[in-house]
Image (cartoon, helix red, strand yellow):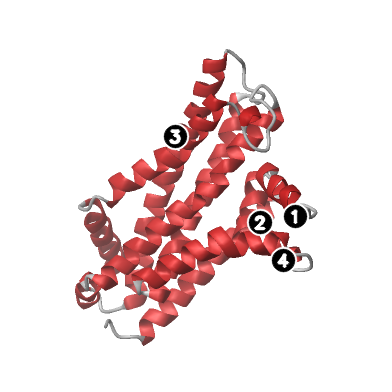
Amino acid sequence: MRQLKNAIRGEVVRLTRTRLPLWTMVAAVACGGLLIGLVALTGPENATPPMPGLDTAAGVSGVLSLLGVALFAPALIGTVAITGEYRHRTVATTFLAVPKRGRVLVAKLIAYGGLGLAYGVVLTLSAVAGIYAGTSAHGIEPGLGLDAILGTTARYGAAAAIYMLLGVGIGAVARHQLLAIGITLGYFYFMENLMMILPGVNIVYPFLPGGATAALTGSTALLEMIAAEAGVIGPVVQAPLIGALVLLGYALASSVLAAAVSLRRDVA
């Protein structure tokens, strides 16, 4: 236990001595406050296709559902951070200091999990600020109360932390940076959307990370919009608790796979 604590402390110190935490917080503000604030200020009713206004519950929920599009960011951060260690060979030094690679991976998951939680908090607070900036600029009251808005954005924040762990797992398995980035962006930007709209295939969507995120957050407005544009029936999502468990299951599975692979491969 003491050795694990030392490994965690080492990972936290190493992480905080880089610019990654700063850029992670910048990304959180960009994906939260700037994205949501821009849509809120321009008015969701002016989007293509038009969305309900922010003075309605559907309008606020629809704008907040855009946070789901930005969840690739923490996954990408985790992926790039881990593959960067392999690319620059710094992971070799870590393995020499802590020969038990499983312990190293656990320490990294805890350290990056903390960074993911910080990302989620900043994402939540900045998104709430974006909503209120938009409604104040238009002289209207948001269609949802502060408690409801905080509840929705907090669930997106929790999902963002889990996506960070998914990115760490993908990076640890792939190791090669360009390959890992391609897998992350290709899956979250292309494969999931494709599987959501393909008839017969979309029955599995509720059990994919995107479907689980929609279940956890309770925001399906964006999914329904994409399905309507594609001319298909929108996906059915599970209960929020099931969505959370599915997401955690993916994070756990990627971590176990990463541990199994790292134990069997040399650092090239």
Of the residues shown, which amino acid type is indicated by label 1? Pro
Cα gap from disc 1 to disc 4, whole angstroms? 9 Å
Labelled disc at residue 211: 2
Q: Which residue carries the number 1 mark?
A: 235
Residue contact between numbered discs 2 and 1, judged by CB atoms under 8 Å: yes
Crowd class of label 3 (few under 14; some 14 to 19; many from 20; radius 10 Å): some
Crowd class of label 4 (few under 14; some 14 to 19; many from 20; radius 10 Å): few
Q: Look at the picture and state if 150 lies above or below 138.
A: below
Cα gap from disc 1 to disc 3, whole angstroms? 28 Å
Q: Decide which of 88, 196 is in the foreground and name it.
A: 196
Q: Which residue carries the number 4 mark?
A: 204
The residue at 37%/75% (across/down) is: 102
Q: Give residue 146's position: percent from left, percent from top.
A: 58, 25
Q: Earlier in the sequence, mark 2 or mark 4?
A: 4
Q: Earlier in the sequence, mark 1 or mark 4?
A: 4
What is the secondary structure assignment of the residue under circle 4? helix
Q: Earlier in the sequence, mark 3 or mark 2?
A: 3
Of the residues shown, which amino acid type is indicated by label 2? Gly
Q: Earlier in the sequence, mark 2 or mark 1?
A: 2
Labelled disc at residue 34: 3
Crowd class of label 1 (few under 14; some 14 to 19; many from 20; radius 10 Å): some
Q: Give residue 110's position: percent from left, percent from top.
A: 38, 59
The residue at 35%/43% (across/down) is: 25
Q: Is residue 217 visible?
A: yes
